[in-house]
Image (spheres, rainbow, N blue to C red):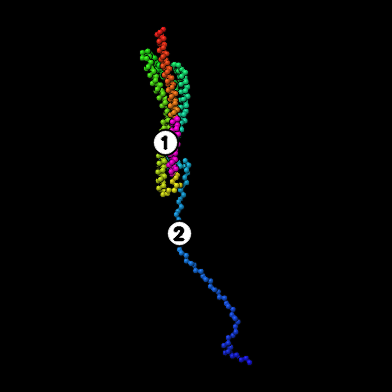
Amino acid sequence: DAPATTPEAAAETPAETAPATPVETPTATPVETPVEQPPLPAPQALPEAPAAGPVHDLSAWGMYQAAHPVVKAVMILLVLASFVTWTVLVFKAIELWIARSRLKRSAGRIREAVTLQAAAESLGKRRDPAAFMAFAALEEFRASEAALDGAGPEGVKERVRSIVERVEVQAGERLRRGIGLLATIGSVGPFVGLFGTVWGIMNAFIGIAESQTTNLAVVAPGIAEALLATAMGLVAAIPAVVIYNHFVRSIAGWKVSLADAGAGVERMLSRDLDYRRAGQLSGREA
């Protein structure tokens, strides 16, 4: 018989229990602690980009407008000088062409004439220098005719030669009037332009010092404006010199033709004196 269990035995004997199911205990996720980074260097101030300079108009008109007032005055003076040069060219070319045409016709009539009286009749009312020589010689011959018998012809020839020379000088000076401006412009123009350039470059360097930069984009416009004055001086001077030399040669050639006409007048006077003397001799012989 199985022994009876007493309450004390039952208490001492552990009761059989079902095997316990293992309980999964949640594992704590490891917390990532931030790694301390070394401190970044303080940001340095970036250099400011240079401010964009003013946009320059590098045309001739734009450089003139941006130039210093003194340089502007120089440019205006050179433009006026160039205008005077071309004005003198037009007017003196017309004047010289008219003088050549008149001298050519009068000299031709003087060559064709035999006596001063015939030359005066052929020239009519012409008042160019060659015609004036013939008229003056005829008047002097008539004024001195009463004294020719006693004084001889040398005095008349000398006086007519003096008249011819004075007409040549006065006509040449009249024709040269105005071309002296060309010589002045040709010799002074480059120096006036150089003065404008020096003044402009001086102001350009002052601007460089004030802006404290040697950037070519800032420096170049001021220098270009200054050099424009020199260019304008050359533009005014070179044509003036060329035109002046052309007129000097042309007037010299015209004066040679006038001198030939004067020599023709003197020959006619000598011929008239010989005719008069021959007439007196033939009268005495008769």
Secondary structure state at the residue bearing disc 1: helix
Going from the N terminus, do you reach mark 2 or mark 1 first? 2
* Residue found 59% across the figure and 80% down from its top: 20
Q: Secondary structure at mark 2?
A: loop
Viewer-proximal residue, 276 or 92? 276
Question: From this viewpoint, is residue 18 visible?
Answer: yes
The residue that disc 2 covers is 43
Q: Is residue 82 magenta?
A: no
Q: Which quarter of the rendering shows the C terminus?
A: top left
Q: Which residues are magenta?
A: 222-246
State the count of labels: 2
Q: Residue at x 43, y 27 (%)?
A: 252
Q: Quadrant of residue 141?
A: top left
Label 2–label 1 contact, CB within 8 A: no
Residue 181 screen position, x and y as percent: 42, 32
- Residue type, numbered disc 1: Gly
* Residue closest to the far top: 286
Q: Is residue 29 left or right of residue 129?
A: right
- What numbered label is drawn on residue 189? 1
Residue at 40% x, 12% y is: 277
Q: Tell me the quarter of the picture where residue 258 sits.
A: top left
- Residue 214 in percent (x, y) is at 43, 48
Res 118 quadrant in image: top left
Q: Position of residue 61 (x, y in %)?
A: 47, 41
Amino acid type at circle 2 is: Pro
Q: Is residue 230 magenta?
A: yes
